[in-house]
Amino acid sequence: MPGGSIYVQQDEKFTGSSPQWWYEKFWREGAQSRRRSRMVKAAVGAVAGFALALRFTLPAPVLYAVALGGVVAGIDWWLDWRAFRATAVWRGRRRGEVITGRLLRRSLGRQGYRVLDGRAIRDQASIDHLVIGPGGVWIVDNESWSPDTEIASYNGRLFFGEKYGTKTAKPLCDAAQAFAELLGRETGIQISISPLMAVHCGMLPRGGSLTAEGVTFLKPRLVARHIRANQKALLDAAQIELLARTAARELQRV
């Protein structure tokens, strides 16, 4: 960008050639078309409301027509806004790690889980969240792909659209192993760590989750539910506290 530092790499999300920039441009240009479509839908809703009022001999059918038309328009606007907001992390307008961290603390904090954000092993691995609780230990990373990218598994292989996903899954599995080895060595508690990926934008299968190549990919709102679903009490309160203190001491903050 003009006036930017030559020492700081520019983020392509904010350049005129990025998919994100074009997505926002087309979204703005399509506003008038969406308004026209919304007016048509509202008109259909109004006609339906008027017809229903006459069918059931309700008083003031015009009011029912206006009310149903307004409801249809409101729902259509909300669906459009929700679809656009779902791309906010991909567009660089929101930070995925902030969203997921808030969801994890809100859902798990009162159930004996400890959530540590932004942790790393020097020159080896870094992750967005480390979750330690009664059901075990998890690492959670955040990622976002374009809205039309299908995340799928075929014969055990991970795919993002037509591309293999091994380069995304393997580093996260390696990080889980590295974190488990460090925490086990420092605490004497032998643990295994499950890697999770919070997907902020992209097309996951119905249900919002997928497991492939050792990593479970989920919508952010489902991460805490997935962790709580492990009903086995693998760690007691003292072990959770020891692991959390050790992680806070031995792992770098990023």
Image (spheres, rainbow, N blue to C red):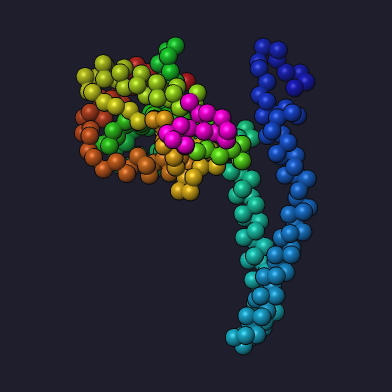
Q: Determine whether, in the image, residue 33 is placed left or right of residue 66.
A: right
Q: How many marks?
A: 0
* In the image, residue 21 above or below residue 243: below
Q: Report x, y in % for residue 246.
A: 30, 20
Residue 161 percent coordinates (x, y) = 57, 35
Which range is magenta?
Answer: 153-166
The answer to which quarter of the image holds residue 182 is top left
> In the rendered structure, does residue 155 fall within the stretch colored magenta?
yes
Answer with left or right where residue 237 lies relative to residue 253.
Answer: left
Q: Is residue 149 left or right of residue 190?
A: right
Residue 70 at x, y percent in the picture: 67, 67
Residue 63: x, y in percent? Answer: 67, 77
Assign the N terminus to one quadrant of the image. top right
Residue plotted at (64% across, 61% down): 74
* Extreme residue in the bottom direction: 57
Q: Residue at x 29, y 41 (%)?
A: 230
